[in-house]
Image (cartoon, rainbow, N blue to C red):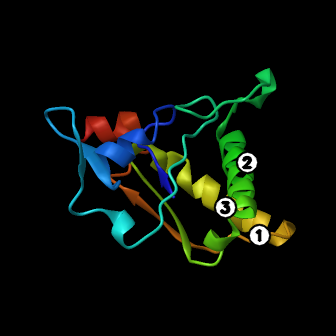
Amino acid sequence: MWLNEVAGSSCLKGVFVENGPFYVDNNLELRDREFTWVRKYSMLYLDVPVGTGFSFTDKEDGYAKNSEDDANELFEALQQFFTLFSEYQVPDFYIAGEAASANHIPRMVKRVEAGNKEEKLKINLKGFMVGSPFVNMKFQTTFS
């Protein structure tokens, strides 16, 4: 699963600019990407938190108020995804992202691990990856 670099920005950037199967060229035409993760792995791109990109809720209280809410939303989304598409439940599952997603991914991993102890449906989480983690703006920009 890929999470975008900044909470509140759509994962479509990951699909079309970073590691998805296609890219948009300078003429605004869709092209096949030569090197992409999807040649070897199934990818799930999620817009997090709810309200970002194509994700939505009909309830005012359905929006995350903190990182714990984000982690719970993600866990619920994964539970629903693996219930609907059980063929993807068997392979090893990794959570990946970049930059500011480094603030959320460890909490999400912790929530999945806790959920695996509580829920009937288990997520085969094997690890996580964070590229160019951006965890403390004040510290990282001062010393960069």
What is the crowding at mark 3: few (fewer than 14 residues within 10 Å), some, or many (at least 20)? few
User: Which amino acid type corresponds to the residue marked 2 in the rendered image?
Assistant: Asn
Residue 75 drawn above or below residue 100: below
Q: Nearer the viewer, mark 3 or mark 2?
A: 2
For residue 88, what is the image quadrant? Answer: bottom right
Separation of marks 2 and 1 at Cα, in angstroms: 13 Å
Q: Nearer the viewer, mark 1 or mark 3?
A: 1
User: Which amino acid type corresponds to the residue marked 1 in the rendered image?
Assistant: Asn
Q: Is residue 60 left or right of residue 88?
A: right
Q: Which residue is mark 2?
A: 72
Decide which of 23, 97 is in the foreground and name it: 23
| Residue at (73, 59) in percent of width and height | 84
Q: Which residue is mark 3?
A: 110
Decide which of 98, 42 is in the foreground and name it: 42
Separation of marks 3 and 2 at Cα, in angstroms: 10 Å
Image coordinates for residue 73, horizontal then vertical, percent: 71, 44
